[in-house]
Image (tube, grey):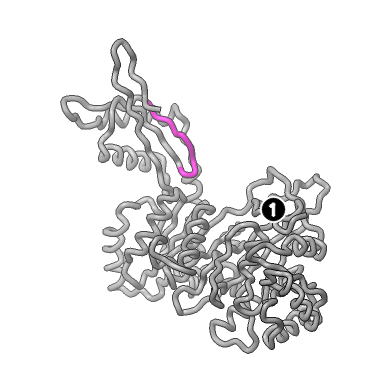
Amino acid sequence: MSDNDFGGWVELREPEADSGEPTGPQPVVAVVGRPNVGKSTLVNRIIGRRQAVVEDIPGVTRDRVPYDAQWNGRSFTVVDTGGWEPDAKDRAAAIAAQAEIAVGTADVVLFVVDAMVGSTDVDEAAVKMLRRSAKPVILVANKADNTTIEMEATALWSLGLGEPFPVSALHGRGSGDLLDAILHALPEAPKIVENRPRGPRRVALVGRPNVGKSSLLNRFSGEERAVVDSVAGTTVDPVDSLVEIGGETWQLVDTAGLRKRVGKASGTEYYASLRTASAIEAAEVAVVLIDSSEVISEQDQRILTMVVESGRALVIAFNKWDLVDGDRRYYLDKEIDRELRRIPWAIRLNLSAKTGRAVDKLAPALRKALASWETRIPTAQLNQWLTALVQATPHPVRGGRAPRILFATQAGAAPPRFVLFTTGPLDAGYQRFVERKLREEFGYEGSPIEISVRPRKKLGPGGRGKAHG
């Protein structure tokens, strides 16, 4: 078995009820240690892809962030955590608390130490915390990039946690042996079985910094699931949580607040932007949070565009409604009419994650948006409606003739995609007219619609016209 020969991330599937395999909860591995010892790099090595945000400064990871992993056909969850420090203050204290919660909910703890530095006072304090948890601990001596450092890592026996595993998370050295040790320490993990029923619907919480995404996640989870701070930009990694909203379990993903275009971001912000984009792509519906007490910004507009272009269902939540007075409501209505006119189909909610106002309306909005997103119209019904529409309002005459719509079909759902077969190109205005009437007839509230036009090729000598393929 090669050090680098570990399977990459795969979508984990529940075992079937009659498979005879373990069907209990998926075991959890928490990765903890002081700041900047390479925890997120190790997480990326375990899951087989660069998913956790990594930068060569301490304090990049702040929440406890779960990732699915598999090794030798067994699946488990890896939880990345922020740097743990004793006697931490303010935000650092909240980050340390998240790490301690991760330890308390884990089956096995990977305690990561910098092999190049050796044990420190902070490491020794962390060992005391881990002993109080009474959880199995695997000591990982990270940054052991060569044989010399591996030999020096043996001094970590002094921590009293048993044999240290020398690993280079960056290069993969020793990772295979570590993964074998993880599986040996874990309770029996469920095998990966294909064709499971669909799990909880995935919801991405997105928005610019400090609009209340983490506060909303904490409101639904009933605990301090994500670090919340008045300083913008607290969340860096996407944070997944299974929460119950409206009697149904949903998978909410709290994402980093986006300040800039991805192309203009750098460092932590650049990778956080990429992961936010990936979280949107992996979601089925996005909740875009907007601070209702502030003017709708250009960045709010860019985030909305990102969601619309991804083809995901959309709910716009105007958060911090408890801070909105009569004057602000008047101007906000004007801003909505002006700035959101291109997406009148988006479902809008006014809520307050802090006070809990109207948060119970989110689940019905999500269900409505997803139902629209997955709607299919039978071809016969679609063409019957379209024929009546075109007869009542034909395409304007251009150059002495008007293109006709010959046939339409729904090419797909999630999001709904329609193809119009025509005798010629349609005006953009008429195409928008068809979309507007389609929504009026069939709904699609909360879902984008894609309409493409396939004009018939012009007749050739002795030939018949064909639609463009």
Quadrant housing the C terminus: top left
> In the figure, 73 relative to 424: above or below?
below
The structure residue drawn at horizontal position 54% and vertical position 73%, both measured from the top left corner, is: 56
Residue 273: image location, x then y, percent: 46, 63
The structure residue drawn at horizontal position 28% and vertical position 12%, both measured from the top left corner, is: 461
Residue 404: image location, x then y, percent: 28, 26
Q: Residue furthest top?
A: 462
Residue 340: image location, x then y, percent: 32, 57
In-front residue for pair 387/76: 76
Residue behind mark 1: 7
Q: Provide the residue span drawn in magenta.
A: 407-415
In-front residue for pair 448/353: 448
> Does the magenta portion include 409?
yes
- Quadrant position of residue 117: bottom right
Quadrant housing the N terminus: bottom right
Asked if residue 55 can be seen in this view, the reply is yes
> What SS does tag 1 mark?
loop
Residue 259: image location, x then y, percent: 40, 68
